[in-house]
Image (cartoon, rainbow, N blue to C red):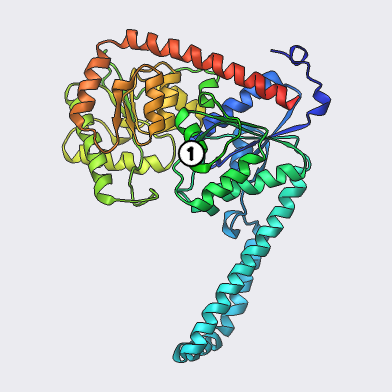
Amino acid sequence: MTERSLGLGMKSVKRIGIFGHYGNRNLGDEAIIQAVMQNLKKRLPKAELVGFSLNPEDTASRHGVEAFPIRRRSSHQKMTATEKDDAVSERVSSASTDSSVDRVKALIKRIPLLRHLARLCLSLLAALKTFFLEVRFLFHAFQYMKKIDVLIVTGSNQFLDNFGGPWGFPYTLLKWALLTRLVRARLLFVSVGAGPIAGMLSCRFLRWTLRFADYVSLRDYSSQQLLRELVGFKGKTHVAPDLAHSLLTEQVKPVCLPQSRRLNGLPVVGINPMPLFDPRYWCEPVDSKYKQYIGKVADFSQRLLENDYPVFFFPTQEKDQGVIIDILDILQERGSLSAPREDYVLTSDSVDDLLANIAACDLTVPTRFHGTVLSLLLEKPTLGICYYQKAKELLSVAGQAEFAYDHEQFQAEDLWCGFTKLAGDIDHVKGQIRHRNSEHTIALERQYHEIIELIA
């Protein structure tokens, strides 16, 4: 597809922003961004792409583009050497006044009225500081947006509030939608996921945001239904597959597996756990449920190892590494590991690394949504431990609904039964997945065509 065939006048397209809550080393989200950039560069070679992310430094180095933060960042996230020196000097100069401050604090603590007034003043000062810092950020963002012609919002789930409440994702999307309207740029939401959404303020923010959009597509029907019924958005929406399905994979080569592991001709199994209910990460942590989850994954892994199947664990983001360590601890205590622990882990620093690791496996058992997406993209028979409806829908569309297991209800025996069924029919299952992938390709080609026409 060329510019001429689309009737594009590229003089009207200067810069396209790729926006999302990415940049935190979540390779599932980065796979989406990489796919979008690959496809836009192929179709609009003269357009300049710009990243809008949580960590613009990471985005710039990872994707080779200019980048801008989507949120105001705290001072410790980015501090120059000069600023660090100034901070040290300030601490040294303030040390001499510490004793005076301590005396004032002691006086305030003794007088209840003064204590309440002090707390009120501190709260007001903090609120004022936050307000002025946000206004300053919005001013810089507005100036930057003047150079952007189109803002494409994508990157896994964007319509949610379980992490950060209404002032997290919903507010961030709303302020950028307003900025896009102010500079008269186009705003496109492309194959975005929705849910969970709990707060009414979140729904209101998202409803206002979507009213500014020129194009809205969701990656599954449950997300579309959520926006209509809960958020109350009545505008036109489309449904198209997750954009990671449009990654270019022709050059992917399987990684070389550790020589210390015995590869005996049996199918190689890749397991992708995640910190479900983990107090170190999860939005609603439940330690007992987390231990049940890793215990069941360890039980299944142990059974595979006892039957001589080569088993490897692969994370899709940094938070998964702690879960893998916990599972390996259980297996080591049981005496199930015959090689160094690190030889059971396939680590990834980039999307290409992750694809190479999955390509080395014959079957996968992912919990992460994009662990499932990328496994199916590479035509791997998949047992999915599903924590949201979206993952079950994904496997159902791929013809593997019977291999979608609820994250709380599944048992190790369930996985073993599903595994033995898949392992005995790998070629047939791969053919089913290949057929579904071709349908995803057609749907995404159609969507890219619609997007290009809107940009034009």
Of residues 405 and 249, the one nearer the viewer is 405
Which picture quadrant has residue 313?
A: top left
Give the percent coordinates (x, y) of residue 305. Answer: 21, 26
48 up-or-down from 9: above or below: below
Of residues 288 and 259, the one nearer the viewer is 288
Instruction: Name the residue type under label 1.
Output: Glu
Q: How many neighbours does mark 1 have within 10 angstroms: few (below 14), some (14-19), or many (20 or more)?
A: few
For this view, does 396 lie left or right of residue 247?
Answer: left
**Residue drawn 24% across and 36% down?**
409
Give the percent coordinates (x, y) of residue 144. Answer: 75, 45
9 up-or-down from 331: above or below: above
Which picture quadrant has residue 45?
A: top right
**Residue drawn 71% across and 22% down?**
453
170 up-or-down from 345: above or below: below
Which of the image's four quarters has the C terminus? top right
Give the percent coordinates (x, y) of residue 380. Answer: 38, 18
Which of the image's four quarters has the N terminus? top right
For this view, does 128 lie left or right of residue 401?
Answer: right
Asked whether residue 302 appears in the rendered view, the answer is: no
Asked whether residue 274 appears in the rendered view, the answer is: yes
**Residue position for label 1:** 229
**Residue drawn 69% across and 46% down?**
178
Give the percent coordinates (x, y) of residue 404. Answer: 31, 26
Q: Secondary structure at mark 1?
A: helix
78 up-or-down from 226: above or below: below
